Image: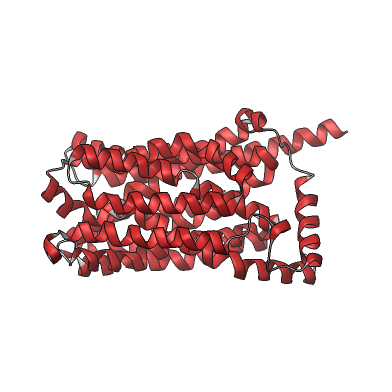
Amino acid sequence: MNTVLENIVKKTSWRLIPFMLALYVLAFLDRSNIGFAKNAYQLDTGLSNEAFALGAGIFFAAYAFLGVPANLLMRKFGARTWIGVTTLIWGALSAGMAYADTEWKFLVVRVLLGAAEAGFFPGMIYLTSQWFPQQKRAGIMGLFYMGAPLALAFGSPLSGALLEMHGFMGHPGWYWMFLIEGLVAIIAGVVTFAYLDNSPQEARFLEQSEKDALLAQLNSEESVKMTSHISDAVSNARVWHLSIIYMIIQISVYGLIFFLPTQVAALIGTTVGFKASCVVAIPWIAALFGTYYIPRYSDRTGERKKVAAGTLLLAGIGIGVSAFAPPVIAIIALCFAAIGFIAVQPVFWTMPTNILSGAALAAGIGFVNMFGAFGGFLAPIIRVHAETFFNNNTAGLLTLAIITVIGSLAILMLQEQTKQIEEKKEVESV
């Protein structure tokens, strides 16, 4: 990549990535903060473990089915309008969790929150593909993906501190946690309308010559991709394979995240509050470093699938060790787990953007993300059922570890499949 284009990418990164990162921090915090409220919320509302697991996962039901149409709508209406509206709605619903004091309210709000967030994450992935050259994309998405560990590292103490507001003005701590974090998202939605540009063509921060150079690079990459038709994205065998892998990754992620505060609290012998939330932050701080360096290594070497497989395998080992290790070793293992299942994702997302373009890319990202949403839905259910079936609290973690290792093997199978496809093309060209 030439120096001029390098400078354009840096300029675009400084403009977009901090803002995208901030939005992702809020989105991830709003979808996962029920993990911090779990014990107090269940105690106050009478919610059973099964109902909590269903509510934690049901978010992903609406999220799954609306991902594809949401991405196509963003392509039609533009990133500024779509992301802005999406953020406003999910912020209002997240704040509405403060008033979900019965089981049916809890389930309804979680479904609506999933529907509202359906367009955000796949929209961000698609937006990245529209602004950044392929060679830089894993590192760029690595910066964006740092939103998840940032939300959990710094949002954990925030959520824990808000839970300490229990009794303020007659409301429980979880009321204030949901309300305040939701209101912050609403403010972010308003800012989006003023800050975000729809595309490089409309970029207010780039000179015309910079726009032309960036668009020329992006268009040259689009011209060599396999397909740009929406129907081809769904019928492509590699897209299905990637979808299953991503579902496994999300089972690993959310099978741990929703229960991590209570798991760590049990390890250190305390209740979920500010102290436990500070310890919970440790694995996510470790994940920040992994999410920064691993995608950059992938960009530098050009190796995607081996890096992704090894990183996900690290997550599986970390989850498994945390199930039976003593507290200090368990926390270290959770650090490796967090590094693995967060850092693998920006590397993973370079794969569909390598083979699809245009409307097919928008639909394909939504389709892969839909399977990931199913993984998020299944994750807490799988963990709770494994613990109930084996009557053992470690069974859920060991089940997640096995599933994660299978995902790593599935990535290696994709590597073999890709090699066979390339060999077939060489034969056909002869």
Protein image colouring: secondary structure
Query: Residue at the right extreme?
Result: 430
- Foreground pick, 174 / 323: 174
Q: Count the marks.
A: 0
Q: Residue at x 30, y 54 (%)?
A: 95
**Residue 182 drawn at (x, y percent):** 34, 57
Image quadrant holding the C terminus, namely top right
Horizontal side, residue 139 vs residue 420: left or right: left
Q: Residue at x 40, y 55 (%)?
A: 28
**Residue 72 drawn at (x, y percent):** 59, 39
Specify whether residue 384 is in view. Answer: yes
- Foreground pick, 151 / 237: 151
**Residue 156 drawn at (x, y percent):** 30, 64
Specify whether residue 406 is in view. Answer: no
Against 151, is 99 above or below?
above
Q: Residue at x 33, y 61 (%)?
A: 181
Q: Residue at x 63, y 59 (%)?
A: 197
> Residue 414 occupies which quadrant of the picture?
top right
> Residue 157 occupies which quadrant of the picture?
bottom left
> Residue 240 occupies which quadrant of the picture?
top right
Against 245, is 340 above or below?
below
Horizontal side, residue 174 vs residue 17: left or right: left
Image quadrant holding the N terminus, namely bottom right
- Foreground pick, 207 / 281: 207
Against 371, is 192 above or below?
below
Horizontal side, residue 430 vs residue 180: left or right: right
**Residue 146 drawn at (x, y percent):** 48, 63
